Amino acid sequence: IGPAPLAGCMLADFGADVIVVHRLSSSGIVVQSGDMTRGKKSIALDLKSDDGLAAFKRIAATADVLIEPFRPGVCEKLGIGPDVLCTSNPRLIYGRMTGWGQGGTFAHMAGHDANYLALSGLLDLFRRGDERPFPPVNFAGDYAGGGTMMTMGVLLGLLERERSGLGQVIDTAMVDGAAYIALPMLKWMQSGFLPTDQYGHLDPAKSVLNQAPHWVESYECKADPAKPGLKQYVSVSAIEPQFYKLLLKQLGLNEAELPHQMDQSGWLEMKNVFGSVFLTRTRDEWAEVFEDSDACVAPVLNPHEAAVHPHNRARGTYALTPGSNGELWEPAPAPKLSRTPGHPPRPSPVPGEHTRAVLRASGMHEDQVQKLLDSKVAMSANNLHSKL
């Protein structure tokens, strides 16, 4: 679940032929992550059986890339580690997706997104004032530091293979990837651009990027009568002086009567001033005020609102989810390539839908495939057993 399926989804969105291998149990096909399978093929094999393992190896022998999401050593125990598969297929890019990595003192421990951020040094950055660290859901570890970095590693491996003709192992650890993506912030802490205390921790009460000043903050707006009980916000990031001047002008505030923008002693007072002003209009009314403005103000939207916003509609940032009767939206592939753009969201496969076709494409005869199906070493799209 999580980052490995996202990496496969990204590759499939841009044209890769991606096959998801579901495992079998006594009750049928076990599905652990069906939310990022758009455009992929799905097969089901029992990798604990000799015949299922042989079928898997046969597929891997002609594959360009394999991505596995297990703890270190699991694939080796199954007999499908890189020492085996990369020997039979020297061109194979073997991606290994873990939280802690293949080596290190934490390598065999369990963990989740916030744990990886904590050890990487990043969770300490996600704070405001004197609040405790607050991880940004599982965006930064699982998906930015994990899935996206795995995708990049696979593409780098494929690019290098054009020169050497050889594959390699991609050891993708979320703790590594999250730290690497945060390189600018960590360098800013070294230079003093991001303030730190005497112990080396970020000082969020003085940090522009942690909403310390009034000109970088999220403000609650007047309640919308059409949406009773709902709190709505705008995001303000008027960092540069020229943008700050525009912000004050459009808020109806006289700069000459206010503390200087960089006067930290006035930041808290000015947050109260800004807060009072933003409570005089609804979020959508403020969005109209700041439309076509360089004051760096944007409405805080939920995903559905973002999907139908005119700017995002114009760019195709979101696309309709297949089979949702026009009611659900999901992110479209990014970035936008001029000649070879990604596929619009495609339907997810039925688990096991392509078992027969993929086995046949691996070179197995029809009678061999049927034997695997009859013995329940492989399974087609039936007997589905869902598991979170």
Image (spheres, grey):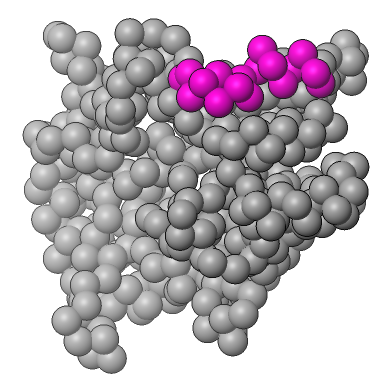
Foreground of the two, 177 or 192 = 177
Question: Where is residue 71 shown, x and y percent of the image?
Answer: 44, 25
Look at the image and tell me whether residue 323 can be seen.
yes
Magenta-drawn stretch contains 316: no
- Within the image, what quadrant is residue 174 found in? top left
Residue 38 place in picture, x, y as percent: 64, 60
Q: Choose top left, top right, bottom left or bottom right for residue 252.
A: bottom left
Bounds of the magenta segment: 72-89
Majority SS type along the magenta span: helix
Q: Position of residue 244 (x, y in %)?
A: 37, 48
Residue 244 seen from this side: no
Task: Indicate the position of residue 166 as horizontal and vertical percent values.
Answer: 83, 14
27 and 234: which one is in front? 27
Decide if residue 251 is on the left or right side of residue 206: right
Residue at horizontal 23 percent and vertical 47 percent from the top: 214
Residue 384 to residue 155: above or below: below
Q: Nearer the viewer, residue 347 or 288?
A: 347
